[in-house]
Amino acid sequence: MADDLNKPKFRWHIVVFLAPAVLVYSAVMIYPLFNTLRLSLFTEVDQERVYVGLQNFKTLFGQTVWSDQFWNALANNFWFFVIHMLVQNPIGIALAAILSHPKLRFAAFYRSAIFIPTILSFVIVGFAWKLILSPIWGIAPGMLDAVGLKSLYAPWLGKEAYALTTLSLVSVWQFVGIPMMLIYAALLSIPDEILEAAEVEGITGLSAFWKIKLPLILPSIGIISILTFVANFNAFDLIYAAQGALAGPDFSTDILGTFMYRTFFGFQLQLGDPHMGSTIASAMFAIILIGVCLYLFGIQSRMRRYQF
Amino acid sequence: MKTSNFIGAMLASTVIAGAASAQDVTLTIESWRNDDLAIWQEKIIPAFEAAHPGIKLNFTPSAPAEYNAVLNSKLDAGSAGDIITCRPFDASLALFEAGHLADISGIEGMASFSPVAKSGWSTDDASVQFCVPMASVIHGFIYNKDAFAELGLSEPTTEAEFFAALEAIKEDGSYIPMAMGTNDQWEAATMGYNNIGPNYWKGEEGRLALLAGDQKLTDEAWVAPYRQLAKWGDYLGDGYEAQTYPDSQNIFTLGRAAIYPTGSWEISGFNGLADFEMGAFYPPVQNAGDTCYISDHTDIGIGMNAATPNPEAATVFLNWVGSSEFATIFANSLPGFFPLSDAPVTLEDPLAQEFISWRGECESTIRSTYQVLSRGTPNLENETWNASVAVIKGEESPEDAGARLQDGLASWYEPQQ
């Protein structure tokens, strides 16, 4: 009897409670992910699926027809990411710093107003901005004309030199609320004692932000950077909604997501090729995995954390 | 007790209803023509069902841009409809080769079509047909008759007259000379390059020579259309780089532009939108008196899912599509989609009559990039979109564009190597 009591009982409730999440996650995430990786090792010859090893990757990186498109998409993707890192995250941090100022009035209103675009659908954002910037119906040319700056207006979305940057900024406009919210939460969690102690030492205002608050929110900034990285390299929707699957003009807004979509599902007369599409998807997965690993092992493990 | 009785009644009624409808066969039609939903439901389906009791039709279109992808996944999953609307050439040929489209060479309805009409849905050696040709679209230019009258212009027939007209409209300044944008890319190729091109490469003659490898995309006949396109850029209106296809349609139907390079498929839509009189002219020839060539492109076919459980009913429907009854209903409810069958059809719409009258005056051909040449990677059709846009914007010279396309084509197409 005593033995029975000491022996730990198998805790069925853990299995039961975990099962729904594990099953759903495996069915909609894990299985498709591994199946995509598997699919990239096959190709179709005469309606038969044939195993070809890494041949698809050789094609993707070895044939200029494919590799030019791939490197173009990757370079565009990096630029997309750089704009987010240089514009979205600093603005998000600045907004959070301003919002957390105790004397700011209507803080709740600003917070919601800035966060609302984040919950809008990509289709709405893409379409609305396309209309705003349209040379024909848009309000952008008219507004610039009203302040005498009509000469600065260009059909941005139609010019190769500007289209990608314009779309990146639209995406920044949409998502600036996320870093703002995360940093805002981090700033609120800094204990007042620390700030008061700093004040006693004569550190106030801007220097309090640079010397006290910023070091304390660095871990949050790290998380935001990695979230931005993953989101940007998985991006697809906004470009597709605004420029279509050909990511015009002349592929200047083509990112890995649109390149993968075009290849996988086909477009207009181009027939879909699920195997090359999976190859590109696997390459995207590898790029994101490498980026996240670099961050986790290279940066996050060295970051200093402060316990309050 | 009450509840279970109620459920029992529901179940019973379902069983009875199921038994009653079991005698009817319902054919589901896959299509990308979601614009035509009303016409199918109000005209085509009632006409067919009245003549063929026992067969019901269910028209289930999806968005044009997604159609190919959606259809392919449905066919692979076995959930596609009985009747498949066929894109011309390789997209459908691939479906046939994959065993998704049935061989319908033998059905009676196919007898009323010419070989050119059938070419869009035949195997390369033309021995097997897998879709009934349904309609073609003719390229040309639609113009605002009121604007032309106001400026004292007449329909241009030669290139010189065409550019003189554009220049006159531009100088006057009250209309945008030509409504076309390069944002969506395909207009530049479809309504630009493949619209004016046949005059240079002499229609079928040049197209077949290109297929056989006797002509190259760097030849004068294939570069010259790009030279003309390069001159279009000046007449397209401010910010055409970011102008989309719907933008162009709206600009023209609102009466803000004088000329609209297009195809006949716009007619039905434009009739309801434009409150001015529209006319049409075919692509101007190089010198007065030259033979004119028009792109009379086979655009829609209709075939049978090889896995359909109702092949007999589907065959009945396909035969009906080949009949003159269908051709008349279709052509008149959708002026601008011209039936391909030899069956006699009377068109009522004046603009559509104008377009179809060119078949008598000019030689017909189809879009140069569609048959075989867009089978490999890089895809010639998509490359042509890109090249046409680059040439209009002045970012690439006509000669460079031709050379780039030729290199791409030669990289996979043997006759061009």
Image (cartoon, rainbow, N blue to C red):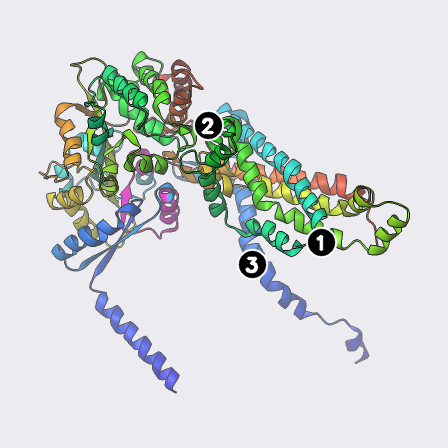
Q: Quadrant of the N terminus of chain A?
A: bottom right
For disc 3, the chain is A
Residue A158 x/y as whole percent? 46, 30
Kindly report which numbered mark, 2 or 1, lies closer to the viewer in this rendering: 1
Q: How many C-alpha atoms fall within 10 Å of the one at disc 3: few (<14), some, or many (≥20)?
A: few
Residue displayed at 31% across by 15% down:
B224
Q: Which mark is residue A250?
A: 2
Rendered image quadrant of residue A262: top left
| Mark 1 residue element | helix
Can the viewer see residue A106?
yes
Q: Earlier in the sequence, mark 3 or mark 2?
A: 3
Residue A47 x/y as whole percent? 39, 39
- Residue in front for this viewpoint, B111 or B365: B365
User: For the residue marked with disc 3, what is the amino acid?
Assistant: Val
Q: Is residue B128 left or right of residue B176?
A: left
Kindly report which numbered mark, 3 or 2, lies closer to the viewer in this rendering: 2
Residue displayed at 26% across by 44% down:
B102
- Residue in front for this viewpoint, A99 or A127: A99
| Mark 2 residue element | loop
Kindly report which numbered mark, 3 or 1, lies closer to the viewer in this rendering: 1
Labels 3 and 2 within one chain: yes
Q: Which residue is mark 1?
A: A185
Q: Earlier in the sequence, mark 3 or mark 1?
A: 3
Q: Earlier in the sequence, mark 2 or mark 1?
A: 1
Q: Residue furthest right?
A: A201
Q: How many C-alpha atoms fall within 10 Å of the one at disc 2: few (<14), some, or many (≥20)?
A: some
What residue span does the magenta drawing correspond to? B67-94
